[in-house]
Amino acid sequence: MEARGPRVELTGAEHRAPAEDAPRAGFVSPNWVTARLDDLVNWSRANSLWPMAFGTACCAIEFMATAASRFDLARFGMERVAYSPRQADVLICAGRLPFKLAPVIRRVWDQMPQPKWCISMGACASTGGIFDNYAMVQGIDTIVPVDVYVPGCPPRPEGLLYGILMLQKKIKGETVFDPELRVEKLADQQGLFLEPATVDELSEPFGNSVHQTRSA
Amino acid sequence: MSGAAENASVAGLRARFGAAVGRSAVLAGATVVTVDRERAHEILAWLRDDPGQRYDYCVDVTAVEYRDKERPLELVYQLRALARSVMLRVKVELAKDRPLEVDSVVDLWHGADWLEREVWDMFGIRFRGHPDLRRILMWENYAEGHPLRKDFPLRGRFSRSEQVRRALGADLDAHYSMEELSIAEAYDALPADVRERLAPLPPGGAGREP
């Protein structure tokens, strides 16, 4: 699939080979186009993502480097870093998330208007990373839905940019007519957004920490 | 044997308080002295106020728990006499078969306020007379105990799903209230519009947007 932009058919006469049935001049104008609505909507959404930077640790330093002139996030339509959830499209959680901040990022996510996406930047945001302890959320996907995970500790700016390009690609595959795509997922009676068993499974220890004891 | 001489304050303490002063040592150039838990506040007050001592700066208050279950917890006060450039480390042993309580030194050094809150939060040592003994690092309704105790499991006492459920159920307005942000004292000096925005919420946090 062509990923650069909507498939737009220019209907100007100059784009057509001269033919006997060429439309009459005046009927066809180069000033209008035909395109799929999804293509146009997704094209504009994907190329004007406003990030809500939720920087909690060293990943935020790499995010700053990504936004600065050398890597220049603005090239991808992320000119304006929001720092204001109501004016943002994509939540970038850059850094480890302690349980103390979990309700904060959830509220930030709830305050963001649809359509919205989430990038989990770095090992800690994605899995808890090296912080497999009592204070740290083991992957922010137990708190908010995540679209793209960027691995690394911290990821280099190229890594984050690649994640953003992947998100843009994902957005270009969406359709505005999908009734389930933009549905807010609210907490169930238990106060969770996922099944408790799913949360526990996502939070399973790995690496050296599988041998750690837990009393409950 | 360390080359550094023992801080002269220890001799002064022994002359003044006798049996209330326990063993002392010079470790890596730093003098450490253990004092009785019941007279700790009196001793620390003397160290601050006596003209020959003048330990006017409380650098740190922290605690140590050893892996040996029989050993008592140690509460550590790191003091400094700014004018003399002298450090003194005072330890108080807290046996585990008694309630972990000791008199607060916030009335001596204001800077000990948050340090004692941290020790309470992490070790569960209560400070009698502390003006505002709340958790400082963990959140207010944290129910799993005191994380730096040796009997505390590294991943916490609850399952991860229970931890997430409790975290998401936290009342943010209660967490980040005026008091939490420590600007309550400056409230009256703020501009009117800021005061209106920051006014304490009615009970239950009604009226604030989600």
Image (tube, coloured by chain):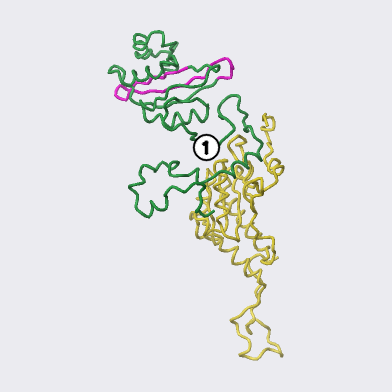
Disc 1 sits on a residue from what chain?
A: B
Camera-side residue: A154 or A147?
Answer: A147
Instruction: Tell me the quarter of the picture where residue A16 sits.
Output: bottom right
Residue lying at 62% horizontally and 60% vertically, measured from the top left: A168
* Colour in which chain B is drawn: green
Q: Residue A197's spot in the image, x, y percent?
A: 72, 42
Q: Is residue B94 magenta?
A: no
Please state if B193 lies on the left or on the right of A78 as rendered. left
Q: Is residue A61 visible?
A: no
State the SS at label 1.
Answer: loop
Q: Residue B129's spot in the image, x, y percent?
A: 42, 26
Which residue range is magenta in the image? Answer: B66-92
Residue extending farthest to the left is B51
Please state if B109 lies on the left or on the right of A181 as rendered. left
Residue extending farthest to the front is B203
Dot 1 corresponds to which residue?
A: B140
Of the 4 image quadrants, the one containing the C terminus of chain A is: top right
Does A29 sit above or below residue B131?
below
Q: Residue B197's spot in the image, x, y percent?
A: 42, 53
Residue lying at 60% horizontally and 63% vertically, measured from the top left: A46
* Colour in which chain A is drawn: yellow
Does A119 sit above or below residue A5?
above
Please state if B170 lies on the left or on the right of B160 as rendered. left
Residue lying at 42% horizontally and 50% vertically, measured from the top left: B198
Three-letter residue code for mark 1? Glu
CA neighbours of label 1 inside 10 A, class few (<14), some (14 to 19), many (20+): some
Of the 4 image quadrants, the one containing the N terminus of chain A is: bottom right
Q: Is residue B87 magenta?
A: yes
Q: Is residue B73 visible?
A: yes
Q: Residue A48's spot in the image, x, y percent?
A: 56, 63
Does A43 sit above or below residue B42?
below
